[in-house]
Every structure is written in C-alpha cells, then in structure tokens.
Amino acid sequence: MKREMKHVKTLTTRDLKESMKKGGCGECQTSCQSACKTSCTVGNQSCEQLK
Amino acid sequence: MDVNSGSVHVVDDIVYDMIPLVEPLVNEGIKDPDLVKAAVVHLAGIPYPEEEIVEAVDEVLELEKSGQLFAKDIYENYVFDFKKRPTVVKALCLHIAHDCNLACKYCFAEEGEYHGRRALMSFEVGKKALDFLVANSGNRVNLEVDFFGGEPLMNWQVVKDLVKYGRSIETANNKKFRFTLTTNGVLLNDEVLEFANQEMGNVVLSIDGRKEIHDKMRPFRGGQGSYDLIVPKFQKVAESRNQTNYYVRGTFTRYNLDFSEDVLHLADLGFQQISVEPVVAQPTDDYAIREEDLPKLREEYDKLAAEMIKRRREGRPFNFFHFMIDLEGGPCVAKRLSGCGSGTEYLAVTPWGDLYPCHQFVGNEEFLMGNVDEGIVREDIRDQFKCCNVYAKDKCKKCFAKFYCSGGCAANSYNFHGNINDAYDVGCELERKRVECAIMLKAMAMMEEDDGAQE
C-alpha cells in the first residue's frame, strides 16, 4: 500500500497495464496442463519472470 | 475488484455505496475533488457523516489517479497485434494409452478410447512428438509434456523411455522438459512412484472424494469400486512428494452437488493439494450439472471457503486449486488474453501421432490439425484458436472474471454452442463464484495479517 487509507485496504496485485510492456515471453506454464484438464483457469498461474 | 488494472480493494460501507455514484462522474471526466464530494453529499443521500464521505472521496480519487480504480480497458487494441503474433508449441498432452482399466461414467474419453480404437502409443511415435515439440518451440526453454490417457500406466515402459529420450536431447537443444503424469492409480506401485518422484514435475491423481461417490462414478469395468485400492497409494504419493507438486483431482456431477463434502473428505484423508471440478457433459447426460443446480453449487463454494478459513486458523490448511489465485506474481496481460493456449501453444497427440488442439477435441475429425510426421497441416485451425480470446467472446466483454479464466475452455464452448468463440454459461457462473471466493480468501488473509501485525 502506498499510503494507509482509512476506508480502503488494497491488496498487492500485479499491475496489468504495466505487464503489457514486458509481458508475453511465453515461458509460463500452460494452464490446462497443471491440474484441471476440463476448465480454463489462468489467474492462479505464476509468471516465470516474477518467480 | 478493478477489472482492468487488476487491483483488489477491501472497502468499507461508505466506499462500497459511493462507488456507483463516483464512477460515472469520473468516466465523464469530473475528477475535481470538490465537485465529486459535493455531488456525492448532495445527490447520494447516503447515510454517513459528511466528513467521512469527504475523506472517502479523497481516497477513491487517489486510487483513480494511481490507476488502481476505474481503469479503462486498453487491451482490446492490443489484441489486434496479438493475433498477428507468431506462436510456438510449448506443451503437449501425450495420449500414451487410449485404453483404461476403469470405466468412469463421465469419461469424455469414453473409457479411454476417444471414439476410436484402443491403442497404445509406441516409443517411435512418442519420440517424434518430442522432436516435433523441440523443433516447433522456437526459443522457449521450458517445455511441458503430460502423460495422459486413457490410463498412462498401461503403457508405462514407453513413458519411462520417452522421459529418458527427452532428457537426452535437453542440453543440445537448450530445452528443459517438465513432465507430468495423470493417473487413476490402479497400476501405481513403488517402482512407478520412485520414477515419478524423480522425473515428474507434477502428478495428478484422480479421485472423486467420498467412497460412495467415487465408487459410483469410477468403477472397474466389472462394476467394483476402485476407492479402497487407490486411496492408500495416493496417500503414499502425497507424503513421498512432501505434500507438494501433486494434485488429487476429482470430478463432481449432479449426483454429488454437495461436493464440498468430497473436498473436505480428501482433506481429511491427509491430502493438501486438492482440485475438484464440475463435470463437463452433454446437457442430455443424467449426471450433467444444470442451471437449476447453480444456487446450491454457489452455496457449496461459500461453505468450502468458510471451512478453509477455519482450517487455516486451526493450523491444518489445504489448497483448493480453483481458489488459488496469484495476485502479485500472476500472469501478464498477454497470457491472460491467450488463455489456455489450446490449438496454438498446446496440442494433444494421439497414440498414432495425430495432432489435435487439446485432449478434449481428440477424436473429433473436424479438429484434426496434422500429425507428428508432417507437423501442423491445418494452419486454419491453429489460426482459429489463435483468435479465441476474451475480446472474441461477447459474453466475456463485461465479465469481471475475464482476466482470470481468459475466456474459458474452448472445448466446453464447442460442446454447448457448436463453436469455440462462445462460452459455457453454467461454467461461467461457477468460475465467477470461484474467483469471488478466491479473492475473498486473499482479502481475509491480508486482514488477518494486518490484525496480527497490530497485536
């Protein structure tokens, strides 16, 4: 958090807009391979660059 | 949640009530704090003291200014460039055996045969598949290969030989294979376990939950249940892998809408990495999830999330795959737009070497893309999948979860609507609920951490 706010608490998240600049290296895991095989879930994947 | 920036905020009642009032003003370019405050105080009639409202408006506008609130969707144009991108193949699902020793009632592979003949992949075909992957992976270093079926342990020697072959070509090609195995556990033994622990980055163990539920849907061909045989083996796998890099993975159907009980049963068996998912079925199947089941299923996800919080506090946590969300180190926008990568980065290979967009399409000739000898022959199919993203789907455009599911499963869309650019509506409802629970769990953890720090 940049500043302690009284009414809002913000979780630390990746800035999606920023990720446009350097993203797309493609080294990350393929979503469907990991555990599901019947549905697509991408939000739980981790970026290889940020590991 | 601010969809386009990816920010997640936990807000009090004042901010919650004022967001719908402030958002249209900001969208019209009215960002002057005094104007916004005046508008909220006078127009809103929301029951809070004026000084509190003024303070909250300042905080909301500060978030807007830093790009964490009311962020615009700037990604649609990015997609146009994105469509032109050259794609490489980085993951294969090897159908090492189109045969199975179980006869699961909901199997999309029809007891492992995928609408075709029973067959085992030969080492030669598998070797060509790995060569195809290396040759088509460009400068990607990390390559994934899942040994899938049917039941891959029915062709175990070939699995081992292919791992050995894969390892032998890694250095010369500057590649790193990440092998995974999906198994029903029937043929699992110590030798398999030792090899898997040495070579497999992840192992997916199929089990549905409570004994009566599991045995009903996952019997042997003779009708006997498989639960008692596999549970001790799976427990051994989990422990031998230090409770990481594996999943027990179950399917729930209309016969166990109270699936949270199955998840908790798996947790009670000692498993800490759990994935239990809704069945994908034709609407005509008696076990298919129906729209009318949604309220009950939403309730089940809430129940599960509450129990997870309780167990976390009690020091016996477990992970539920669909509630896992990586907010800080999650994927870039490019990844979130491209989704699962089926048909482009990810392909399925049949025992005889045919290539399909993913395992769910295997056996549907309309989607036969090529083979391991000739490579991709039908580039039109690949291009069709390349364009399959959240902006190609009307239903996704306004969905808050679009950057978490990335437009959902193309195969589900095809099964229900006959094309890959639609969305499976029941699946969408459940996905939204799961994302909501996942974020709630993160927010709870943050607040508990803050409380802990203050104490």
Image (spheres, coloured by chain):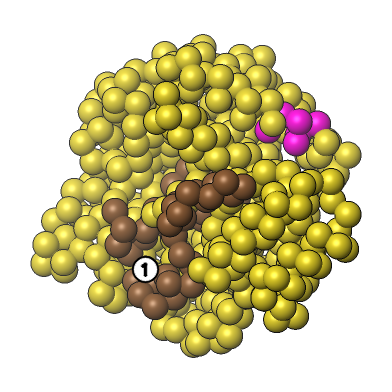
Chain colours: A brown, B yellow
Q: Nearer the viewer, residue B48 or B340?
A: B48
Q: In this view, does B223 lie above or below B73?
A: above
On screen, residue B416 versus residue B438, left or right, reads right
Picture quarter containing residue B365?
A: bottom right
Could you say which quadrant of the image residue B295 lies in? top right
At horizontal 24% and vertical 65% (from top left) the residue drawn is B141
Is residue B3 at least partly visible in the picture? yes
Where residue B223 appears, as percent x and y from the top left, is 65, 19
Q: Residue drawn at (56%, 53%), measured in percent from left and top? A: B8
The N terminus of chain B, quarter of image? bottom right
Towards the viewer: B296 or B275: B296
- In this rendering, is residue B276 above or below B32? above
* Within-10-Å neighbours for mark 1: few <14, some 14–19, many 20+: many
Q: What element carries label 1?
A: loop
Give the image location of residue A34, x and y in percent.
Answer: 44, 47
| Amino acid type for the residue under numbered disc 1 | Gly
In the picture, the quarter occupied by the C terminus of chain B is: top left
Position of residue B333 in the picture relative to residue B306 (left or right): left
Position of residue B303 measured from the top left corner of the image (x, y, whole percent): 68, 26
Range drawn in magenta: B296-301
Identify the residue under disc 1: A26
- Regarding residue B358, the answer to whether it shows in the image is no
Pick whichever, B200 or B2, lies toward us: B2
Query: Which residue is more in the foreground, A33 or B130?
Result: A33
| Percent position of residue B414, x then y | 71, 63
* Residue at screen point 43% across, 72% down: A18
The residue at 67%/43% (across/down) is: B12
In which chain is the residue bearing label 1?
A
- The chief SS type of the magenta part is helix
Q: Does the magenta stretch include residue A16?
A: no
Of all residues, the one furthest to the left in this rendering is B172
